[in-house]
């Protein structure tokens, strides 16, 4: 894995351009939030700095998860090309082999944008520094990264049943990222329930922000649910691993 990381840094111009592209992607995603709040001072019960904090926490967590587990998106290509068999013949678990096959450092640029957005939002909110606030933010990033990582594994497990199913799985991986970046109050009730209790995207950023801002939260998304983030993270990984292991057992090779 270290050799693959060094190989990315050798071509500095290519790496820099890719990193800039990732940074700009994060910027464009934020522009959508900014445009909505430029037209209306309140979005989902939140001001621009408050909504920016939600966006920032989700971006940091998703960026870290994408950097490590984003390779799971390549599983359909591995299956079609018969490349997956080379991993299955090795005496190592399949998931660690796949996530160490390559690590895209350029995705750190998106994390960087999230960090910048978080720092700026904290300056405008003037919450005051405390170890409690730092712990809540650190916990949000930790458990948010764990939840988003499980989404990539869940999506990979679904590929063993689906033909060209990337578009379907993107609906809850990248769709979950989008849900996590916006205030939960703007979500329709069925979407709010699904992306909290099945795919816990709202737990990654919106609920921790409610604690930091001392807001009660909307129906079905009370502030107190944020303290259950470890439980949601465990649940998301249990679901992902059940689907993944069932998919691996089902797999019989590229030739069927």
Image (spheres, grey):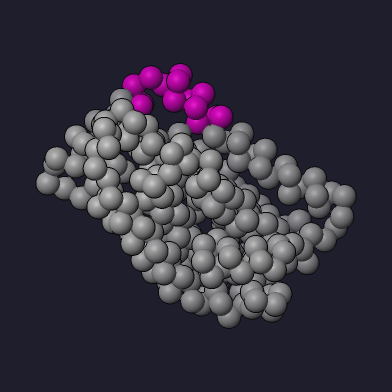
How far across and down, in percent of the image, does residue 142 sit? 43, 61
Which one is in front, 7 or 93? 93
Farthest residue, direction front: 256
* Residue 222 appears in view: yes
Farthest residue, direction left: 91
Q: Residue at x 76, y 56 (%)?
A: 48
Which one is in front, 102 or 237? 237
Number of numbered callouts drawn: 0
Question: Is the residue 124 above or below the residue 11 in the image?
Answer: below
Q: Which residues are magenta?
A: 8-21
Q: Residue at x 25, y 52 (%)?
A: 249
Q: Quadrant of the C terminus?
A: top left
Which one is in front, 227 or 254? 254
* Residue 112 appears in view: no
Q: Tell me the chief SS of the magenta region.
A: helix
Q: Is residue 109 left or right of residue 88?
A: right
Q: Is residue 227 left or right of residue 45?
A: left
Q: Is residue 255 left or right of residue 225?
A: left
Q: Residue at x 65, y 39 (%)?
A: 27
Q: Quadrant of the N terminus?
A: top left
Farthest residue, direction right: 39
How far across and down, in percent of the image, does residue 133 sit? 55, 70
Q: Quadrant of residue 215?
A: bottom right
Q: Quadrant of residue 183?
A: bottom right
Q: Residue at x 81, y 52 (%)?
A: 37
How far across and down, in percent of the image, does residue 177 sit? 57, 51
């Amino acid at each position: 894995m270290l050799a693959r990381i060094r190989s990315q840094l050798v071509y500095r111009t290519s790496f820099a351009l890719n990193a800039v592209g990732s940074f700009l992607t994060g910027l464009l995603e934020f522009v959508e939030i900014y445009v909505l709040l430029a037209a209306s001072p309140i979005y989902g019960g939140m001001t621009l700095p408050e909504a920016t904090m939600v966006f920032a926490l989700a971006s940091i967590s998703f960026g870290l998860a994408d950097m490590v587990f984003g390779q799971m998106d390549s599983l359909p290509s591995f299956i079609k090309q018969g490349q997956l068999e080379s991993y299955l013949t090795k005496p190592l678990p399949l998931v660690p082999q796949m996530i160490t096959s390559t690590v895209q450092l350029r995705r750190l640029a998106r994390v960087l944008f999230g960090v910048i957005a978080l720092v700026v939002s904290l300056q405008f909110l003037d919450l005051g520094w405390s170890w409690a606030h730092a712990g809540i933010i650190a916990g949000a990033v930790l458990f948010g990264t764990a939840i988003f990582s499980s989404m990539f594994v869940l999506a990979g497990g679904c590929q063993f049943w689906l033909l060209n199913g990337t578009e379907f799985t993107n609906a809850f991986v990248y769709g979950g990222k989008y849900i996590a970046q916006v205030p939960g109050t703007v979500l329709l009730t069925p979407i709010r329930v699904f992306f909290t209790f099945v795919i816990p995207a709202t737990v990654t950023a919106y609920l921790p922000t409610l604690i930091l801002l001392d807001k009660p939260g909307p129906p079905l998304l009370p502030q107190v649910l944020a303290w259950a983030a470890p439980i949601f993270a465990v649940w998301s990984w249990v679901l992902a691993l059940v689907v993944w292991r069932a998919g691996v057992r089902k797999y019989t090779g590229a030739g069927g």
